[in-house]
C-alpha cells in the first residue's frame, strides 16, 4: 500500500513550492502535519476514479447488489451481512430503490437509510438506486439532496416500472432514465457519480436492440459515468453487447451483472420480472433437480464461475457486479473460486473507517467506543473536524444525544429471549452479574448451558486481540472487575501483523496496555491506594454515574494508546484515551446497564434492582500502562488491589 | 517534569465539559491533538507566575544581568555566552538600557536587539531595561511597541541618570520610574511583567531611607510585579530592607542583586556609579591583593557564596540576581558552589526552544536546520503557526529571504584568518575539501596543524550524538560524501538518556537514521542505482543548486524522524524531513558554500573556483532509513555505492 513514486521535478517546479500555487503544494498542504496522512488513497477517490485506477493496474474487482429489507430485524441482519461481505473487498455495493416501500424516508428499512448505514457505519462505497417514473421533480430533488446530506456520492439512475398498466409520457416529467441523469447533472453539477443500466439483450420495451443501444448512448452522453448491465446467461451475450456499445462510441466502463442461480423459484421470479428467457441448456439441468436447493445452488455457482472466467479472460472485463438477492453463500463461493474475494487482514487504521466524505480526514478516535463504533459514528455525525479540538471545545457541537431512534436501530441483534438466556432469566446478586461477564470472556456456556456471545457494551464475541488477554480477564471478572474494553501492550510489531497490524506495510505498530471496567466502590478505594505506587507509570480515570471523577491525567491531555510509524510518513496515533470524551462515554456506558440489561426484567423485580444497584453505585475505571516496552503492569495493579482487600 | 496532579471533579464540573465554558475545557482545547502538548509548563507561563511557582515549590533560582556590547564581534561573543550560561538554567536574564548607545535601534549592539536575540534565538526569558528620564512619551511608547513586537514580555522600569548636572522636573514628563510604570500599565494594560529597582540602603538621591521605601511602594502600587535590588555587601542589609518593605505593605517578590567582586577596578567603578560604600573589612582584604586578579576573584567568589548562603538560609529569599558584568567565570563558580547551577541534560524538545510568545506552540521543525537553529528562527519569524501546513501552503508567508543583515549577524564567530587556517589557505582540488570535512569529523588537526572546529553548515564542533557515528562519517567524508547533518537510529531509549533523551521523564524517544551530504553527480548516479534495492526502506531527496530534484517521498509528505512517547500524552514528533522545506534549506545550504567559504579567497583564484565548482555541480542528498528497529542501513547504502563505482 505504500505509494512510492519517483518524482523528478524540474527547476521550475521546485520554485513553485517557494511561492507559486501548484497542485503539488496543495496536496502537500493537505498532507502536512496535523492533517490526515494519506494512508489509503481509496478514501480520497471518487468511485469512477477507483474504477479507472483498478482498470489501469489490471486489478480485477467485484461489487454487490442488495435490496432493502422489510422489517427492522431484517435490517439489523442485513447490516451484519454488509460487514461480513464488506470484508471480501467489494469496490462498492448498491441498494435498490423500492418505490412501494417509501424508499426516501427515515424508516430504518428504507433504501435511503440502508444506503446511509452502508456508507457511514459499514464504511462501504455505496450506490443508491433511484427511479424517476411517476415522481415530481421536487420529490426527486428532495431525495437527491437528502442523499447528499447523508454522505451518499453515487446514484444509479433508473426509469423504474410504470405504476399502472397504461403508462403515458408526461410532457415535462421524467419519462426515461436519461431525464433523471440530466436532472442530476443540472441540479448537482458533478457532485454525484452516476451509473445507468444497460441491457445486453436490449430493453424488453425498446423498439429494437439498436434503438436501445442509442438510448444507452444518450444516457452516457447526458452525464452517466458507467454502466451496469442486466443479468444474462451467456458470456457471449455480454461481450457482443460491449463491442456493439463501443462501436457506437460508448467508452465508459460497462460492468456485467452476474446472477448466480440460487434456487428454482428465485430464478423463475427474476426471469418473469426481467422478461428474460432462460436458455434451454440451463432449463434442462435445473428442471430435474428443481426441489433440491443445494444441487441447484451448486450448479448456479459452477455456471457463474465459468461464465465469469470467460468474461475476465476476454480481457474486456475488469469488474463483475453480483445480484446477491441479499444472500451470502453463493456469491461468496463464486468470488472465492474466482480468486477475487480478498479478505485483507491489513487495515488502514485499527478501527473500521467510515466512507462518509466528511470523515475521510478522520484519523483519531477515543478508545472507549472501540466495541461500539456505530454509536461513535452516530454521536459524532454532526462534527466537521475529526476531532481537532472538538472533544474539548465546548463551543462546538459535542457528542450527539443518547436517546434516539438510532440507538434502537443499533441495538443488539439478539431478541429479548436470547438475551435473557445469556444474561440470566433471574439474577440472584452481583455475583450472577460477575458470572455473565466471565462467561462472555471464556466463551464457556453459563450454568443454564447458554453461551454469552454479546454484552451491552460489546455487540460481537471477543476480539482476536482481546483473546491474548483471556486468562487474566477471566480471573479478574470472576472477582468483580467487570471488564468492557482492553488491549495488550505492543512494542513495535510489523504493521502487517495479522492480529494487531494496521496501516501501510513496512511500518511498526505500538500500543499501551489498556483496561476498562466497572467495579464497586469498595474495590475502587483499594485500587486508589495501590495506584499511588504506580503514580508515574499508570494513568487512570475513575468516574461514577453522578460524574464524580478521579484522575491523574496531566492537564486533561489525551493519552495516545495506539500509534504507528511508517516509511516516509508522519506518526499516526489513531486511538487515544481522552479525558473529555470519556465523560460522554461514561453516560453511554452507564445507560447501557439500564437500557439493554435492566429493562429485560419486570419493574421492581429483584433482577432489575440488582442491575439498577450496580448502575447507581459502581464506578467506571480506565487504566493505561504508559511503559509499553515493559511487561503490562495492569494485572499486577489488580492483583495488588485484591491482596489489599483480603 | 511530569506534572501529575490528581483532580477530583464534582458532577457539576464534569458537566461543564459537555456544554459549559470552564477553564478546564479551554485548556483541554488547547492541548487536544495537533496542538502543542504541554511538555514544559514554563513555555506558557509569565515570568511572575514562574517566580510564584518556584516560590511555592521551594525551588531556588537565579537570574543574570548583562549589558549590551560595543562591537558586532562582541555581540556574537555575548550571544555565545547567553547559550552557555543559559545552560545553567537561569529563571531569566536582563539586558541593561544604555541611553547613549541608541538602545532602541536595530543595530546589532543595541539593548533592544540583544534582548531580542536572547528571547528569540537563545530561548531565554528576558527582561529589557528601559529608562525614562529625558525622553518623550512618544519615544517611550515607540520603544515599548517595538519590544512587544519582537516578543519581549518583561520590562525593568527605571528612571535613569539625568543627562545634565542641573536636572529639573518636567511637568508632564517622566521624572521618576513610577511615571514609566504607570505609562506602561496605561498603554499596554497587563501585557508586560514590570520589574522595578529597590535600594537596600536607600537611593543615594532620596531624602531619606524611609522616603525611598515610600517611593518604592508607589512603584509597586502603580503596577510593578517584582523588585530587584541594587547590589549590597552584607546579607543583613538586604534582610533588613526586605522586612522594612514588608512592614509598609510591599508584598511582591524582592530579589537581591548579587555582585561577585571580580577585580579591583570594576569594583571601584561600580562603587563610584552606585554611590555605595565598600565596607572596611572588604577593603582591608582587597587593597593588599589589588594587582592579583585571580586572588581578588577567588575572594569575591568566597564572599558572594557565603552571603548568598545566608540569604537563602534566611528562608526569605527564593531567587538571586547576579550582576555578571558580562563575565562568566565568577558567577558560574558561585552558582555551582551554591548548587543552583542546574545543567539539566533533559531538554523539553530535541532542539532549543525559542521564548517568543508566538513560538510557544512550536513543536516540530525540519531536521535540516539542526545545526543552524538561529537561521531557522530568523527565516520563520513571520510565521504565525508552527508549522500547521505553512511549509506547504504557498499562499502564506514562506521562509524569509536569505540576504539580510541577520545572516551577517549570525555569521561564523571565527574571523577570516581563523577560517582560512581551518578550511585551507589554498585549495588544490576537491580532495582538499574532502580533507576539511574529514578533519571536522575526526577532530584531528589538518595538515597545517589546525583543528577544524566549525564548518559553514555547523557553527559548533560535532554534537555528542553525532559522535556516535564518527567512525563511519570519517570513512565516507574521505571519499567525497561530504556530510553536514546526521543522526543515528534510536529504538526506544528512556527520555532521560543523557545523549539522545528529551521530554518529560518516564517516556521513550525514537529516531530514524538520517544522513545528509553534498556529493558529486558521479556518486549520485551510482547511489540512485543502489537505492533501487532499498526502495521500500530508504526515503531520499536529491537536489542540485538548479533545483533538479529526485525523490521517492510518497505524496510529498513529511517523514517523522524523531518522536517521543510520554506518560499520559499524545505522541510528540519534533523533527521531520519535510520535502517542501528541504527546497528552502537547499538554497541556504548551497549559498553557504559561496558566502562563507568561496568568498574567503580572491576572485578568480583557484581555491575560489574549486568551491564554486562544487557549488555548481554537486548534489545535496538526504537519506532516511525507515526501519528504525534494525541496524542502520545507510552505511551499507554508501558502501554499496562505492563498490558500484569501483
Image: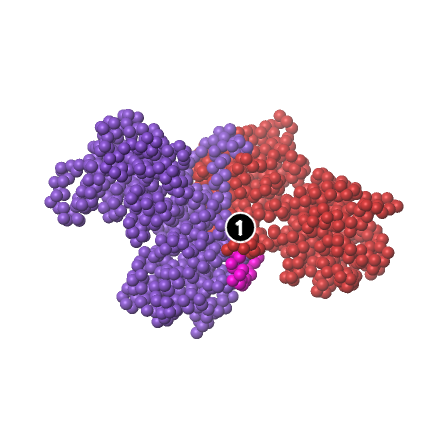
Chain colours: A purple, B red
| Residue B301 position in % (x across, y down) | 74, 57
Q: Which residue is mark 1?
A: A395
Q: Based on the displayed image, in which of its 4 quarters is residue A312 positioned? A: top left
- Image quadrant holding the N terminus of chain A, namely top left
| Residue A585 position in % (x across, y down) | 45, 57
**B138 versus A608 height, above or below:** above
Of A555 and B603, the residue lying toward us? A555
Residue appearing at x 35%, y 60% in the figure:
A455
**B120 versus B394 height, above or below:** below
Q: Chain of mark 1?
A: A
Of B42 and B69, the residue lying toward us? B42
Q: Any magenta on residue B87?
A: no
Highlighted range, magenta: B1-17
Q: Based on the displayed image, in which of its 4 quarters is residue A174 positioned? A: top left
Residue appearing at x 13%, y 38% in the figure:
A281
Q: Please state if A22 lies on the left or on the right of B423 as rendered.
A: left
- Image quadrant holding the C terminus of chain A, namely bottom left
Q: Please state if A641 lies on the left or on the right of A258 as rendered.
A: right
Amino acid at each position: 500500500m505504500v505509494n512510492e513514486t519517483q518524482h523528478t521535478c524540474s527547476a521550475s517546479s521546485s520554485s513553485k513550492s517557494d511561492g507559486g500555487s501548484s497542485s503539488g503544494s496543495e496536496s502537500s498542504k493537505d498532507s502536512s502535519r496535523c492533517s490526515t496522512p494519506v494512508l489509503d488513497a481509496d478514501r480520497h477517490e471518487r468511485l469512477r476514479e477507483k474504477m479507472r485506477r483498478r482498470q489501469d493496474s489490471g486489478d480485477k474487482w467485484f461489487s454487490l447488489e442488495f435490496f432493502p429489507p422489510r422489517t427492522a430485524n431484517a435490517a439489523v441482519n442485513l447490516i451484519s451481512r454488509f460487514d461480513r461481505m464488506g470484508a471480501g473487498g467489494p469496490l462498492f455495493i448498491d441498494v435498490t430503490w423500492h418505490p412501494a416501500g417509501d424508499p426516501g424516508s427515515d424508516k430504518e428499512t428504507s433504501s435511503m437509510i440502508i444506503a446511509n448505514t452502508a456508507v457511514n457505519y459499514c464504511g462501504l462505497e455505496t450506490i443508491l438506486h433511484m427511479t424517476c417514473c411517476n415522481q415530481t421533480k421536487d420529490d426527486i430533488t428532495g431525495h437527491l439532496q437528502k442523499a447528499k446530506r447523508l454522505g451518499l456520492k453515487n446514484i444509479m439512475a433508473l426509469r423504474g416500472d410504470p405504476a399502472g398498466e397504461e403508462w403515458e409520457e408526461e410532457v415535462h416529467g421524467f419519462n426515461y432514465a436519461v431525464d433523471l441523469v440530466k436532472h442530476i447533472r443540472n441540479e448537482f453539477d458533478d457532485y454525484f457519480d452516476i451509473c445507468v443500466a444497460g441491457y445486453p439483450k436490449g430493453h424488453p420495451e425498446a423498439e429494437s436492440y439498436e434503438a436501445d443501444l442509442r438510448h444507452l448512448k444518450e444516457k452516457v452522453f447526458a452525464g452517466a459515468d458507467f454502466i451496469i448491465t442486466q443479468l444474462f446467461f451467456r458470456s457471449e451475450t455480454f461481450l457482443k453487447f460491449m463491442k456493439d456499445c463501443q462501436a457506437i462510441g460508448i467508452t465508459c466502463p460497462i460492468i456485467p451483472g452476474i446472477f448466480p442461480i440460487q434456487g428454482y423459484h428465485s430464478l423463475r421470479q427474476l426471469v418473469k420480472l426481467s422478461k428474460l428467457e432462460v436458455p434451454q441448456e440451463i432449463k434442462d439441468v435445473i428442471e430435474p433437480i428443481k426441489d433440491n436447493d443445494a444441487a441447484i445452488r451448486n450448479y448456479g455457482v459452477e455456471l457463474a464461475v465459468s461464465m465469469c472466467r470467460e468474461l475476465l479472460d476476454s480481457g474486456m472485463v475488469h469488474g463483475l457486479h453480483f445480484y446477491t438477492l441479499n444472500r451470502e453463500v453463493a456469491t461468496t463461493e463464486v468470488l472465492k473460486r474466482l480468486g477475487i474475494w480478498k479478505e485483507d487482514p491489513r487495515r488502514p487504521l485499527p478501527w473500521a473507517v467510515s466512507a462518509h466524505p466528511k470523515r475521510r480526514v478522520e484519523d483519531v478516535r477515543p478508545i472507549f467506543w472501540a466495541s461500539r463504533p456505530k454509536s461513535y459514528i452516530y454521536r459524532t455525525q454532526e462534527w466537521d473536524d475529526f476531532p481537532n479540538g472538538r472533544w474539548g471545545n465546548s463551543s462546538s457541537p459535542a457528542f450527539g444525544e443518547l436517546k434516539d431512534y438510532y440507538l434502537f436501530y443499533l441495538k443488539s441483534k439478539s431478541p429479548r429471549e436470547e438475551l435473557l438466556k445469556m444474561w440470566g432469566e433471574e439474577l440472584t446478586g452481583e455475583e450472577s452479574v460477575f458470572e455473565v461477564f466471565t462467561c462472555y470472556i471464556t466463551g464457556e456456556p453459563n450454568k443454564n448451558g447458554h453461551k454469552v456471545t454479546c454484552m451491552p457494551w460489546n455487540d460481537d464475541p471477543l476480539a482476536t486481540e482481546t483473546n491474548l488477554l483471556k486468562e487474566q480477564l477471566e480471573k479478574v471478572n470472576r472477582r468483580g472487575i467487570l471488564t468492557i474494553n482492553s488491549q495488550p501492550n505492543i512494542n513495535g510489531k510489523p504493521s502487517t501483523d495479522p492480529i494487531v497490524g494496521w496501516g501501510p506495510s513496512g511500518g511498526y505498530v505500538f500500543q499501551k496496555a489498556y483496561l476498562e471496567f466497572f467495579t464497586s466502590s469498595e474495590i475502587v478505594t483499594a485500587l486508589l491506594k495501590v495506584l499511588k505506587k504506580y503514580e508515574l507509570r499508570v494513568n487512570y480515570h475513575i468516574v461514577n454515574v453522578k460524574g464524580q471523577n478521579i484522575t491523574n491525567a496531566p492537564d486533561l491531555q489525551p493519552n495516545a494508546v495506539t500509534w504507528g510509524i511508517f516509511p516516509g510518513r508522519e506518526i499516526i496515533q489513531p486511538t487515544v484515551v481522552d479525558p473529555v470524551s470519556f465523560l460522554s462515554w461514561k453516560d453511554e456506558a452507564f445507560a447501557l446497564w439500564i437500557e439493554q440489561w435492566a429493562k429485560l426484567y419486570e419493574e421492581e423485580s429483584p433482577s432489575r434492582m440488582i442491575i439498577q444497584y450496580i448502575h447507581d453505585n459502581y464506578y467506571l475505571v480506565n487504566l493505561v500502562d504508559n511503559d509499553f516496552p515493559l511487561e503490562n503492569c495492569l494485572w499486577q495493579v489488580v492483583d495488588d488491589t485484591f491482596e489489599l482487600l483480603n
